[in-house]
Image (cartoon, helix red, strand yellow):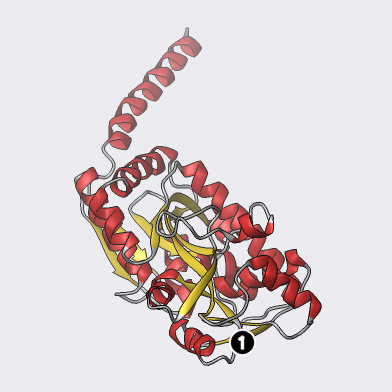
Amino acid sequence: MVRIRCLQLAIAAFAAASIIAGPAAARYPDRAVKVIVPFAAGGPTDVVARVVAEGLSEELKQPFVVENRPGAGGAIGTDLVAKAKPDGYTLGVTGTGSITIIPFLDPKLSYNPSRDLTAVAMLSTLDLLIVARADYPLNHMNELVAFARTKPGELTYSTAGVGTPAHLDMENLWNLSQIKALHVAFSGDVPAINGILSGDVNVGLISASASSPLVAAGKLKALAFGGPGRSSAWPDLASVAEQTGLTGYIANSWNALMAPAGTPQTVIDTVNAAVNKTLAKPDVRKKLEALGLTPFSGDAKTAVDYVARDTETRKRVIELTGLKRE
C-alpha cells in the first residue's frame, strides 16, 4: 500500500508540474528578448536584424531589442550568444563569417558553432554577381573557364578581401572547374570594383548592391548570378550553376537567427513561425531587396541544414587553399 501510495503521489506531482510548465512554455515570450548583432550599427546585418526584430515584436507582443556587440569579425557578439542561457531570451543575428568561416581559421576561437549554437531561422542571402568591365571580351562563364585553361595564370579576380565569403566562393568555383586564377584582395567592394574598372583585374565577385548600379550605368557587365537559380531582380542573367553545369554551386553570404544550443524546440518553433510571417510582409521584403538581400524563409530544419551544408563547403575550401586568419 505504501508503494502504491508513493507512486500515486509521484504521478500526481508530475502531472501538476506538467500543468504548470505547459502554460509557462506557451507564454513565451513573457518579457523582452535580446537580439545580439555582432557587427556595428548601420551595416547590412544590423539592418536585417532591426527589420526582423520589429516584426517579431509585432507578432509575439514583446520587445525584441537589438544590441550591437561588434568586434573580431563578428566573433565577439556570436560568442555572447553561444554562452547565453538557452531560454530563448538571448538570440543573435549572425552570418557566414562568424559561423562557417572564422571557426576554421582560428583554432583558439572560444565557441564552436556546431556545438554551442542552433539555427532558428534563415533571414536573407546577400546576392553576389560575377562582373567585368563593360568592354571585357568574354561574356559567359564557360568562356571565362576556357580562357583560364588555355592561358594558365592569366585570369585575375577581385573580392572585398581575403577570407570573405566571395573569396571562398570564387576559390570553390575554380577548384570545381579545375582551373587556377589569381586572387587580388581589396578592402571592400568599392575598391574591388575600381580594380575591375581600371583594368587591373579581369573579373570580380561583388555584392549586387554595390555592382548593379554600375551594371545599369553600362560601366560593368554581369556575367553570372551567384544564387542557386535566376533572381527576380535579374531574370535574364543565368546563374553560375546554370552556365557551367556545376549543380548546387552557390556564391552568396547569408544571415540567420541563432540561439544557444539547448534552447527548447517549442521556443525555436514559435520564433521561427514569427520570422516567416515577418519575411512574408511586402514592406519587409521591399526593405531587404533594396539592400540587395533576398528574404529566405523556411522552418528551423531548413535553417539547420543550410548552415550545415555551407559549413562543410567553407571547411573544404579553406583546407584546399590553406587559408589562415590574418
Residue sitting at x 69%, y 70%: 143
Q: Position of residue 318 (x, y in %)?
A: 69, 71
Residue toward you, 179 or 1: 179
Residue at image position (35%, 40%) is: 273
Q: Does residue 95 appear to the left or right of 47 in the view shown? A: right
In which quarter of the view is residue 320 placed? bottom right
Mark 1 — residue?
A: 184
Would you call the spot at circle 1 few (<14 residues within 10 Å), some (14-19), or many (20 or more)?
Answer: some
Compared with 238, 88 (above or below) is above
Instruction: Estimate the x, y position of residue 71 in percent, counting from the top left.
Output: 43, 79
Q: How many marks?
A: 1
Q: Is residue 87 above or below residue 291?
A: above
Q: Is residue 288 visible?
A: yes
Residue 15 x, y percent position in the rendering: 37, 21
- Looking at the image, residue 177 sits to the left or right of residue 131; the answer is right
The residue at the far top in this view is: 1
The residue drawn where x is 29% and y is 36% is: 24
Q: Residue 292 vs residue 204: left or right?
A: left
* 218 or 191: nearer the viewer: 218
Q: Is residue 83 visible?
A: no
* Mark 1: amino acid: Val
Q: Quadrant of the C terminus?
A: bottom right
State the image coordinates of residue 45 (x, y, percent, origin top left): 37, 67
Q: In terms of depth relative to the viewer, which is nearer, 136 or 50? A: 136
Question: What residue appears at the point 47 percent right and 15 percent down from the top-left corner?
Answer: 7
